[in-house]
Amino acid sequence: MALNELIITRAIIDRFSQKFLEYTEVDTAIVGGGPSGLVAAYFLAKAGKKVALFERKLSIGGGMWGGGMMFNEIVVQKEGKEILDIFDINTREYQPGYFTADAVESITTICSYATKAGAKIFNCMSVEDVVIRENRVIGLVITWSPVEMAGLHVDPLTIMASNVVEATGHATELLHVIERKADIKLNTETGRIMGERSMWAEKAEKLTIENTREICPGVYVAGMSANAAFGGPRMGPIFGGMLLSGKKVAELIIAKNNDKSA
C-alpha cells in the first residue's frame, strides 16, 4: 500500500482534536506527570473517572527517570514495593526492607497502565492559571510549553475539572499560581506554601503520605508537592512515598465524589 503524507497529517490532527475536545471537561485534572501523578491517574481511571494529565515536558516521569544522580535505579520500602507489584514491575531486595527497581521500567510501565486504564496524557502543555468560582478551583488555563518557553504572546485555552491534583513536585507550580493570583487561603499552618526542608528520607516518606490531602477547595496535593506545600523535608531517590501518595489522592477523590452522589 502506498503511503500518503496528507492522510498521515489529517489522521494526527483529527484524532488529537477529538481526544482534546473530549477532555476539555473532566472529573480530575492532574498537573504533573511524575510517579505520584501517574499512579493517581491509573487508580482514578480504573475507578471509571474521566482523567486528564498535563505534563509541561515532552517526556513524562518526573524525577523517577533519573533514579539517583542519573543512576537509573530506584529504591522503595516494603509498602512501596506493594504498589510496584500492582503494576507487575520487577523488584529485587537489596537489604531487609529495601527493594530496588529499574527506573525506566518503573515509569514506563506505570504510564502504560494509566493510559490503558483510560487516563489521557497531554504532554508539552503547561498550566499558567486557574479558573475560580465561589472560592473554588474549577478549571485550568493551559498553553503549549514551547509557547510559554519562547515568551510568545499567545492566549491560552481552558479546561474544566471537578477536582485538580497538584503533582508538579518540588516547584509546586500550580499552588504558586493560586497563591499569587487568587484570594484563597491554603490549608497549611500559615495559609501559604511553606516550602520543602532539607533531606530526611525516613521523615519525608511518612510525611509525603500524611500531607497528601485537599489543600484548598477543589485542589489536592500529592507527591513532593505535598511535602513542599506543608513544609516537609525532601526524600531523594526513594519513591515509595510518591507511589503511595498517588494511590491515596485517588482514593480521597473517589471517596469524596461517592459521598456527594450518595
Image: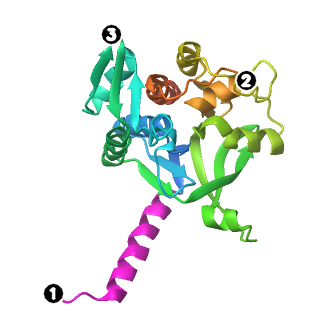
- Secondary structure of the residue carrying numbered label 2: loop
Residue 128 x/y as whole percent: 70, 54
Quarter of the rendering containing residue 207: top right
Label 1 packing within 10 angstroms: few (<14), some (14-19), many (20+): few
Viewer-proximal residue, 192 or 74?
A: 74
Q: Is residue 56 above or below residue 219?
A: below
Which sits earlier in the primary sequence, circle 1 or circle 3?
Answer: 1
Residue hosting label 2? 187
At 52% from the left edge and 26% from the top edge, which residue is drawn?
Answer: 256
Foreground tag (1 vs 3): 3
Q: Is residue 258 left or right of residue 181?
A: left
- Secondary structure of the residue carrying numbered label 1: loop
Q: Is residue 75 left or right of residue 233?
A: left
Q: Distance between the residues labelled 1 and 3?
A: 57 Å
Residue hosting label 1? 1
Q: Which colour scheme is used?
A: rainbow
Which sits earlier in the primary sequence, circle 2 or circle 1?
Answer: 1
Mark 2 and mark 1 residues within 8 Å of each other at the beta carbon: no
Residues shaded magenta = 1-23
Residue hosting label 3? 96
Q: Distance between the residues labelled 2 and 3?
A: 37 Å
Is residue 144 visible from the viewing direction of this image?
no
